[in-house]
Amino acid sequence: MSELVERLLIGQHPVEISLRPDQTIDALRERIERGFVHVRFTETRGGTELGIPIDRQRSDLSAADFAGRTGQLTIVGDLTFDYIRVRCIAEIDLPSLQGRGRLERLPQTAISAS
Protein backbone atom coordinates (compact mmCIF):
# COMPACT_ATOMS: atom_id res chain seq x y z
CA MET A 1 0.00 0.00 0.00
CA SER A 2 1.30 3.44 -0.86
CA GLU A 3 2.42 5.90 1.80
CA LEU A 4 -0.27 8.35 0.66
CA VAL A 5 -3.10 5.84 1.10
CA GLU A 6 -1.74 4.84 4.52
CA ARG A 7 -1.57 8.50 5.57
CA LEU A 8 -5.14 9.27 4.47
CA LEU A 9 -6.46 6.17 6.27
CA ILE A 10 -5.34 7.67 9.60
CA GLY A 11 -7.41 10.46 11.17
CA GLN A 12 -9.21 13.42 9.66
CA HIS A 13 -7.74 15.68 6.98
CA PRO A 14 -8.63 19.09 5.52
CA VAL A 15 -10.63 18.73 2.30
CA GLU A 16 -12.42 20.92 -0.18
CA ILE A 17 -14.91 20.26 -2.92
CA SER A 18 -13.23 20.71 -6.30
CA LEU A 19 -15.55 22.13 -8.95
CA ARG A 20 -14.73 23.28 -12.46
CA PRO A 21 -15.18 25.72 -14.02
CA ASP A 22 -17.15 27.41 -11.22
CA GLN A 23 -16.48 26.86 -7.51
CA THR A 24 -20.08 27.57 -6.42
CA ILE A 25 -22.77 26.02 -4.26
CA ASP A 26 -25.01 25.72 -7.32
CA ALA A 27 -22.29 23.76 -9.15
CA LEU A 28 -21.99 21.45 -6.12
CA ARG A 29 -25.76 20.86 -6.09
CA GLU A 30 -25.61 19.91 -9.78
CA ARG A 31 -22.76 17.44 -9.15
CA ILE A 32 -24.67 15.88 -6.27
CA GLU A 33 -27.75 15.48 -8.49
CA ARG A 34 -25.51 13.72 -11.04
CA GLY A 35 -24.17 11.47 -8.28
CA PHE A 36 -20.47 12.29 -8.52
CA VAL A 37 -18.19 14.89 -6.89
CA HIS A 38 -14.46 15.56 -6.61
CA VAL A 39 -13.00 15.87 -3.12
CA ARG A 40 -9.50 17.31 -2.74
CA PHE A 41 -7.33 16.47 0.27
CA THR A 42 -5.44 19.76 0.55
CA GLU A 43 -2.52 18.84 2.81
CA THR A 44 -0.79 16.39 0.51
CA ARG A 45 1.94 17.38 -1.94
CA GLY A 46 0.04 19.36 -4.55
CA GLY A 47 -3.27 18.13 -3.17
CA THR A 48 -4.91 14.78 -3.82
CA GLU A 49 -8.18 14.89 -5.72
CA LEU A 50 -10.49 11.88 -5.69
CA GLY A 51 -13.60 11.34 -7.79
CA ILE A 52 -16.33 10.14 -5.45
CA PRO A 53 -19.43 8.30 -6.68
CA ILE A 54 -22.00 9.41 -4.10
CA ASP A 55 -23.57 6.69 -1.98
CA ARG A 56 -26.98 8.26 -1.43
CA GLN A 57 -27.88 5.96 1.48
CA ARG A 58 -24.71 6.72 3.45
CA SER A 59 -24.45 10.42 2.57
CA ASP A 60 -26.35 13.01 4.62
CA LEU A 61 -27.59 16.13 2.87
CA SER A 62 -30.39 16.87 5.36
CA ALA A 63 -28.57 19.77 7.08
CA ALA A 64 -27.63 21.50 3.81
CA ASP A 65 -29.77 24.44 2.72
CA PHE A 66 -28.68 25.02 -0.87
CA ALA A 67 -31.18 27.86 -1.42
CA GLY A 68 -30.04 29.67 1.74
CA ARG A 69 -26.41 28.68 1.12
CA THR A 70 -25.97 27.48 4.70
CA GLY A 71 -25.45 24.25 6.58
CA GLN A 72 -23.31 21.18 6.27
CA LEU A 73 -23.38 17.94 4.35
CA THR A 74 -21.65 14.59 4.53
CA ILE A 75 -20.67 12.97 1.26
CA VAL A 76 -19.80 9.28 1.29
CA GLY A 77 -18.66 7.09 -1.56
CA ASP A 78 -16.60 3.99 -2.31
CA LEU A 79 -13.76 3.95 -4.81
CA THR A 80 -10.43 2.36 -5.64
CA PHE A 81 -7.40 4.52 -4.81
CA ASP A 82 -3.92 3.22 -5.70
CA TYR A 83 -5.41 -0.28 -6.12
CA ILE A 84 -6.97 -0.23 -2.63
CA ARG A 85 -10.75 -0.24 -2.09
CA VAL A 86 -11.63 2.66 0.22
CA ARG A 87 -14.62 4.65 1.40
CA CYS A 88 -14.27 8.43 1.40
CA ILE A 89 -16.24 10.35 4.02
CA ALA A 90 -16.18 14.14 3.62
CA GLU A 91 -17.96 16.50 6.02
CA ILE A 92 -18.36 19.79 4.16
CA ASP A 93 -19.36 23.28 5.32
CA LEU A 94 -21.63 24.47 2.52
CA PRO A 95 -20.73 28.21 2.49
CA SER A 96 -16.97 27.56 2.21
CA LEU A 97 -17.10 24.19 0.36
CA GLN A 98 -14.39 23.04 2.78
CA GLY A 99 -14.27 20.65 5.69
CA ARG A 100 -12.71 17.46 7.00
CA GLY A 101 -12.41 14.08 5.34
CA ARG A 102 -11.07 10.63 5.85
CA LEU A 103 -10.66 7.31 4.10
CA GLU A 104 -11.68 3.92 5.45
CA ARG A 105 -10.26 0.73 4.00
CA LEU A 106 -12.85 -1.67 2.61
CA PRO A 107 -12.54 -5.44 2.27
CA GLN A 108 -10.46 -6.18 -0.80
CA THR A 109 -12.02 -8.37 -3.47
CA ALA A 110 -9.96 -10.72 -5.58
CA ILE A 111 -10.11 -10.24 -9.31
CA SER A 112 -10.41 -13.55 -11.05
CA ALA A 113 -8.90 -14.24 -14.46
CA SER A 114 -11.46 -15.90 -16.71
Image: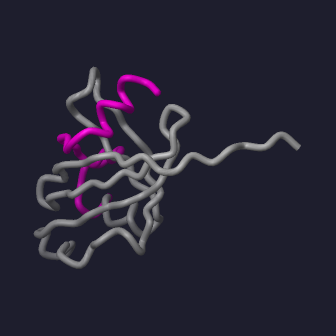
Q: Residue at x 16, y 61 (%)?
A: 94
Q: Is residue 32 above or below residue 39?
A: below
Relative to 93, 89 lies left or right? right
Judged left or right of residue 57, residue 91 is left
In the picture provided, is 106 more to the left or to the right than 83?
left
Q: Residue furthest right?
A: 114
For the image, the number of numbered tags is 0
| Residue 59 shown in magenta | no
Measured as percent of width and height from the top left, residue 33 is found at 42, 69
- Residue 4's place in the image compared with 35, above or below, is above
Q: Where is 89 relative to 80, above or below? A: below
Residue 106 at x, y = what percent? 47, 50
Q: Residue at x 17, y 75 (%)?
A: 63
Which quadrant of the figure has residue 59?
Answer: bottom left
105 displayed left or right of 108 = left
Camera-nearest residue between 75 and 66 = 75
Point 50% across, 48% down: residue: 79
Residue furthest to the bottom in view is 62
Q: Which residues are magenta?
A: 1-27
Protein image colouring: one colour
* In magenta stretch: residue 9: yes
Q: Which residue does the image show at 14% across and 59% down from the upper left?
A: 93
The picture places residue 86, in percent across and down from the top left corner, at 45, 47
Residue closer to the observer: 96 or 15: 15
Q: Quadrant of the C terminus?
A: top right
